[in-house]
Image: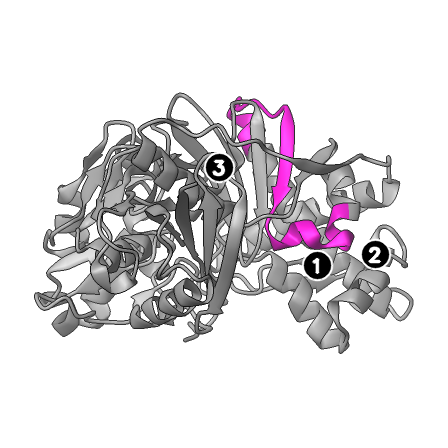
Amino acid sequence: MTTVVGIDSSTQSCKVVVVDTHTGRTLAHANAPHPDGTSVNPAAWLDALRTAWWDAGVPGRGDVVGVAVAGQQHGMVAVDRHGEPVHDALLWNDVRSAPQAARMLAEHGTEWWVERVDMAPVPSLTLSKLAWLRENDPEAASRVERVMLPHDWLTLQLCGEFVTDRSDASGTGYYDAAHDRYRPELLEEYFGAVPQLPRVLAAGGAAGTLGPEWGCGSGVVVGPGAGDNAAAALGLGLGEGEVTISVGTSGTVFACSAEPPRDPSGVTAGFADATGRFLPLLCTINAARVMTSTAELLGVGLDEFTRLATSGATDAGGLTLLPYFDGERTPNLPQATGRLDGMTRASLTRENLARAAVLSVANSLADCLSVLRGLDVAVERVLLIGGGARSEALCSVLPDTLGMPVDVPDTGEYVALGAARQAAWVTTGSFPEWERSVGRRLHPTSDTGAQRFRQRYGDARANLETELAADPMERRPEPTG
């Protein structure tokens, strides 16, 4: 038997899985936490990887033949000529570059950006973060020699090679996935320079070999890696007509497509996937943390929160929550905050507040699915993964909110599994056909309460968008971390 190692370096933690190369069965796993906040010293990711790597028992195994890294997308890792970060990495959910993204959009318009990089500028993108660095810390910006993404940085630590893949490169704002090329003129315009950028490897290409300090002997192949959502699609074996909803720190809704998506609104990101195809994707900043924050406010654990959320009025008794606690990406409202409407003495109960929090997350995801449908992306089957798939409260409302059944694959670390699958592909030269196991199917119940909430939610969102359009600087959350 031979094994491969998949790494998921997410916002919150680093997960390592050891997988049988031929069957995809997980043999060992471990995880280590990352610091909280929206800006992080990349050294913390390396520390977490080392901890999880050793806890999973990888060093000393004589059967490891490959490894690959999946990582949170967009994060700005800018280093000097010595390889030292000039600034903490700004993560995907750091919205301090909202003014720069807004200016980019105002200067060129949505259509111009979609034609060049398949999406409109938002604060998540690496390019907007580099523009922020140039304007707010010009001394640090002047020392930037290389720019890379979180998974690229970890791949560099594993094998010493400065490389990336199409999926992660396509989320930078300066890579054209449809034509597989960087757009250096965008860096010149908004960063004032063109730093060294990682070489983009083809799907199934090798980055290099694992360094001896990782304790696995010689000849262990390192894959190109991938963005976390592309890796999740790879781990699931996502096919055309299938849409994945992943609920973790963020909420993502993505599909598999042979052709690059063209969303004239710029809302849908035209990412590449990890197989040579495309991954039209919409992302929300606020997802599982909306529910955990509400549980903390109520002073209860998640089990009691679930009981509260499933025991009250199905439409939350008239309460309507907009879950934009940390600003939002879909819709693109980085300056927004959350909003709770419909409060009366009768409606403001613990049960209704818990229910409203869960329904708000479900409706935010439903908005994303509606956008995909509007682009004629086939939506024949929905798969639910991530930590949210373990929330009985969310599972109980999602089918009625989406208006269709939802399949929940057996619990698994699908991002890390996707990285392992890539490692197996690179090592063996053929795409591994691992079986996907679906644990249960959730069916709509024709709940009229969920439908009433959906109508109120849409009205509240439209009202907020109108208010912020009239005064776009009215609210802006301070960056954390």
Quarter where residue 429 is shown: top left
| Badge 3 vs badge 2, beta-carbon distance below 8 Å | no
Which residue in the protein does label 3 denote?
233
Residue type for callout 2: Ala
Q: Residues within 10 Å of mark 1 (few under 14, many from 20)?
A: many
- Amino acid at circle 1: Leu
Return the x and y of residue 396 as percentages of the image width and height.
79, 47
Q: Nearer the viewer, residue 218 or 226?
A: 218
Q: Residues within 10 Å of mark 3 (few under 14, many from 20)?
A: many
- The C terminus: image quadrant: bottom left
Q: Which tag is nearer the camera, tag 3 or tag 2?
A: 3
Q: What residue is shown with label 2?
A: 316
Q: Tell us which disc is closer to us: 1 or 3.
A: 3
Left or right of residue 306: residue 423: left
Q: Which label belongs to residue 321?
A: 1
Kindly check if marks 1 and 2 are in contact, taking CB atoms under 8 A apart as contact. yes
Residue 149, position in %: x, y? 29, 54
At 86% across and 69% down in the image, what residue appears? 349
> At numbered mark 1, what does the secondary structure look like: helix, strand or loop?
strand
Q: Secondary structure at mark 2?
A: helix
Q: Identify the mark at residue 296; answer none if there is no mark.
A: none
Residue in the image at 40% along x and 66% along y: 54
**Which of 109/447 is in front?**
447
* Residue stretch rendered in magenta on the structure: 372-395
Q: Nearer the viewer, residue 111 or 448?
A: 448
* Marks 1/2: CA–CA distance: 10 Å
Q: Earlier in the sequence, mark 3 or mark 2?
A: 3
Q: Which residue appears at 90% of the width and 55% of the height?
A: 313
